Amino acid sequence: MRRALPLIAAAVLLTACSAGTPGSAEPAPAPTAAEPTGLVLPPRPRELPLDDVDPCALLTPTQRETLGLTDDSSRSRSTAPGFVGPACSIRGYQPRAVAINIALVTGSGIGVLTGPGATTDDITPITVAGFPALLARPASADFCSVDIDTAEGQFIDVQFADGGRTPPIAQDELCRGAIEVAEQAVTTLGIG
């Protein structure tokens, strides 16, 4: 529920499409630290600060084409508690409708998701492009999120949602899409 309002707003404003090959999550490497909920995250391979990064620039035109997205995007600012920072929504329509939102959380670390009572989502530790991440499956099956720990006190929140067409997209497929977008965004960030 913690993401419902920003997601609903993004879904109403924009829809997106992905025709790319689903991404893959790697199992998390050997743990080094336990978070308060017992989730264990591996260390970051290096710092990728999000200060002064344009969230809409994290997917290049080539990546957007591969993912089946349009070049249209909408910049905004996430104000959800624990998720404050610049955000970008991207849309597309074929062959399926999905809404993608990328938020750069610059005021709190990924621990905001692992503290006691922080979320009701089903959280699984994964790695994305070598960085520690969390795959979050909410009870609402119309979206899936990936949160990537890129720097101390900062993370990228990728939401991948069904665009509202019939039949709805299965949550497993939405999670694969979220992982693929997250991998592309971290790759672009690491090159820049």
Image (cartoon, rainbow, N blue to C red):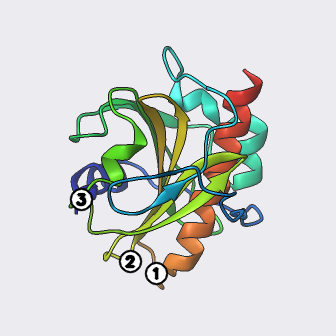
Can residue 133 be seen in the rendering of this structure?
yes
Q: Quadrant of the N terminus?
A: bottom left
**Mark 3 or mark 2, which is nearer to you?**
3
Checking the image for residue 81, the label placed there is none
Which residue is pictured at 62% across the width and 38% down the height?
A: 44
Quarter location, residue 136: bottom left
- Distance between the alpha carbons at the discs numbered 1 and 3: 32 Å
**Mark 2 or mark 1, which is nearer to you?**
2
The residue that label 1 is drawn on is 168
Q: Nearer the viewer, residue 186 or 153?
A: 153
SS category of the residue bearing label 3: loop
The residue that label 3 is drawn on is 116
Q: Nearer the viewer, residue 177 or 14?
A: 177
User: Percent position (x, y) of residue 66?
Assistant: 77, 51
Checking the image for residue 141, the label placed there is 2
Q: Is residue 151 above or below residue 72?
A: above
